[in-house]
Amino acid sequence: MSLFPSLQDDARVPDVLQLDRRAGRALIELNSVIMRQPSALSEAEREMIAAYVSGRNACQYCHGVHEATARAYGIDGDLLVAMIGDLDNAPVDDRLKPILAYVAKLIEPPFRLVQADADAVFAAGWDERALHDAINVACLFNFMNRLLDGHGITIEDDAREARGAMLAEHGYSPLLKLLQD
């Protein structure tokens, strides 16, 4: 339920972004670049990171939508649940665990990050660009989580599934069309 009187109770991301169309377009362009540009991290892996960050932040909207998107890309739903509850024992690919551990520390007080955290990512075979991309996803979803929670935006299961499927198939560009002047 929206916390803003100008937004309907069933408001969604486009409604929030239309409050300031210029900023909304810039934000969606940033989402598109971070989540869909070529990267050592696949689109599915970036969606998994988005779901993980949003789940750790308890953002019902972003976690639900990006969990659905990750599943649309073929990521096991049980894995997505398990990694939020206990990353160390979740059946996550060993190569991805250091990246997820890194972003987990990043969304908590980030001063706890140390060289060993980055070194674990590099030792798993990732390069600096992949870690940079993972950091961008974590930062973006910390922002998005707070943007939507700050406006009181929630989503029902059926809408979450539809939004996840749409993101997997079409990316973020359809949102840009909604924000044209």
Image: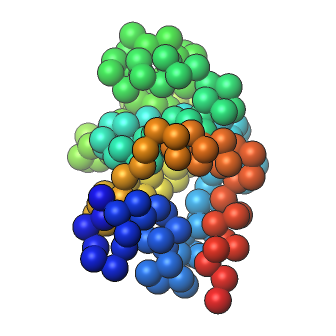
Residue beneath the point at 50% across and 18% down: 79
Task: From the viewer's perspective, tell me whether residue 148 is left or right of residue 74.
Answer: left
Instruction: Name the foreground residue: 83 vs 167.
Output: 167
Q: Identify the residue at image location x=52%, y=53%.
A: 136
Q: Nearer the viewer, residue 105 or 60?
A: 60
Location of residue 153 in the rendering, given as x and y in whole percent from the top left corner: 36, 58
In percent of width and height, residue 3 lies at 25, 67
Q: Nearer the viewer, residue 69 or 120?
A: 69
In front: 14, or 82? 14
Query: Looking at the image, which residue is at 66% across and 33% down?
Result: 72
- Residue at the image position 69 percent from the left and 37 percent from the top: 42
Residue 73 locus on image (x, y percent): 69, 32
| x, y percent for residue 126 | 62, 32
Q: Does any portion of residue 45 appear in the rendered image? A: no
Q: Would residue 38 be found to the left or right of residue 30 on screen?
A: right
What colour scheme does the image use? rainbow
Quadrant of the image containing the N terminus: bottom left
Q: Is residue 162 visible?
A: yes
How many numbered marks have been drawn onto this rendered protein structure?
A: 0
Please tell me whether residue 102 is drawn above or below residue 97 in the rendered image. Answer: below
Viewport quadrant of the C terminus = bottom right
